[in-house]
Image (cartoon, grey):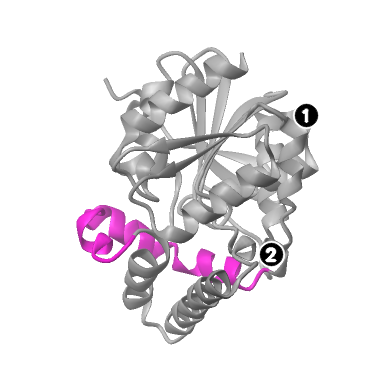
Amino acid sequence: MNMMSRKALERKNVGRVKMACLDVGEGEPILFIHGSFDDHNSWDKVANIMCETHRVVTYDRRGHSSSTDEQGQGSIYQDVGDVIGLMNVLQLKSAHIVGHSYGANVAIALCDKAPSKIKSLFIHEPPIFSLLTGNAELDRIRLSYLGTMNVVASMIEDGRVEEAAELFVDRVAFGEGFWQTMFDECARRSILANVDTWLDQYYDPDRLSIDVSALKNVGNKATISIGTSSLAPYEIIAHRIAGMIPEINLVRINDAGHGAHISHPRQIASELINHLKTVG
């Protein structure tokens, strides 16, 4: 039974924006944060498993799909404030926080700004490309990815939104051909509807100032997952983080990639369940 699809999406007043969210199930709360070009639906398959035993909250980040936004340049710290505000509105003193991609970056920033809100942390492949440093090969990889994102931004500004989205999906996030193979037409329309939110992120200088050491604030209650079929930078970044934060638990999702929560939801859910057992 798909409990997530049976519940109506609701908007909550969070500061100056209206956050669209689903709040399903009972038990210890889990809050899921989605990534770029995306919305709450990306977590549906995992959330539907977890809401059998937990209270599950998924939501559209500000400006994404059914959530509103403010005018002007956005900041990752606005996203952090939104998490805190939404939890307060839902009367969640704390929750297990789960983040994918840019949503994982938001979760890491939350560790810095409001660690008391975090019962535990589970993140999948945070794209902290600033960690790709230390030798010529890592510099080459970082500059290549940053260069591709520059092209994506230019395409969006020129109105070539579908080309931009496909380039981002195939070269930055998931791998060649994934635009056509991972997403159905409905998912591709959702991605295209959220291109401007990625452009806003691209121009946010604060996104580059995430303090990875903030993960120490949750100690041994953090898990980072990586797919065995993911693009190379994500594994490098995950291992860099694990090297910096020895307490963090590093797990692999077999045969999955950056979109493991979409393509391999049962494996992600299984690792999340193991994580929750470990952190108590």
Q: Is residue 92 left or right of residue 46?
A: right
Q: Nearer the viewer, residue 107 or 10?
A: 107
Q: Position of residue 16 (x, y in %)?
A: 70, 51
Q: Nearer the viewer, residue 77 or 88?
A: 77
Q: Which residues are magenta?
A: 175-204
| Residue 188 is inside the magenta segment | yes
Residue annotated with mark 2? 208
Q: Residues within 10 Å of mark 2 (few under 14, many from 20)?
A: few
Q: Secondary structure at mark 2?
A: helix
Q: Position of residue 236 (x, y in %)?
A: 52, 55
Q: Is residue 141 visible from the viewing direction of this image?
A: yes
**Is 150 placed above or below 202 here?**
below
Q: Residue at x 77, y 44 (%)?
A: 112
Q: Residue at x 28, y 66 (%)?
A: 176
Q: Nearer the viewer, residue 116 or 177?
A: 177
Q: Position of residue 164 (x, y in %)?
A: 38, 75
| Residue 274 is inside the magenta segment | no
Q: Residues within 10 Å of mark 1 (few under 14, many from 20)?
A: some
**Is 13 placed above or below 198 here?**
above
Q: Amino acid at mark 1?
A: Ser
- Residue placed furthest toward the bottom: 158
**Is 240 placed above or below 58 here?**
below
Give me the C-alpha separation between circle 2 and circle 1.
23 Å
Mark 2 vs mark 1: give the one in front. 2
Q: Residue at x 33, y 26 (%)?
A: 6
Q: Earlier in the sequence, mark 2 or mark 1?
A: 1
Image quadrant holding the N terminus, namely: top left
